[in-house]
Amino acid sequence: MRIQRRRKKADVEIFTGTIADITFLLVVFFVVTSILGATRGLGYHPDTEEPADVVKPEASIDVHVLADGSLEVDRRPMSLEQLGPYLAAHLRPNPSKPVILRTDVNASYGAMVEVMDELYTAPERLGYEMRTLAIPTEREIQQNWVDRAFSDS
């Protein structure tokens, strides 16, 4: 009689303990590197000593819409109808002279839109060229006009 040996079958199983560890480490790696990459940015540092293209207020046309809707152009009261001819007289000799539009915080939106319409339609209507129209931010207004207004007095 022959004795049959029972063959022991090996359990087939994939050990997943190290796969979980590796997956966790990869997740941590990508989270850390994505945070570092997002905060770096472009690395642009403007020159703090002297800006390159600073336009002096005297070399520009300052259009200021006041709180009551009236206009001041280069610190002189002016009506909306007088704005186009004034700009034509000053921009025909030098079309690259910047026009700076400032609006008082309490001015109505409609008053600003009327001035913008005049600024965009007057060059074609009166035959001159306006190359630069700038609208400064509140911070720029505080730095360039409010401080200067107190020092002029």
Image: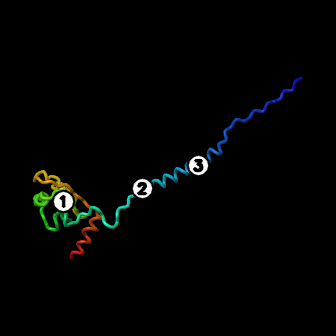
- Quadrant location of the N terminus? top right
Residues at circles 2 and 1 in contact by the CB criterion of under 8 Å: no
Task: Give how far apart the Cα atoms at labels 3 and 1 are.
Answer: 61 Å
Along the viewing direction, whichever of 109 and 61 lies nearer the viewer: 61
Residue matched to label 3? 24
Residues at circles 2 and 3 in contact by the CB criterion of under 8 Å: no
Amino acid under disc 1: Lys
Residue matched to label 2? 41
**Earlier residue among tags 2 and 3:** 3
Q: Residue at position x 70%, y 35% from top?
A: 12
Q: Position of residue 126 (x, y in %)?
A: 10, 53
Q: Secondary structure at mark 1?
A: loop
Q: Residues within 10 Å of mark 3 (few under 14, many from 20)?
A: few
Quadrant of the rendered image containing residue 122: bottom left
For residue 26, above or below residue 99:
above
Q: Position of residue 10 (x, y in %)?
A: 74, 34
Label of residue 113 in the image:
none
**Earlier residue among tags 3 and 1:** 3
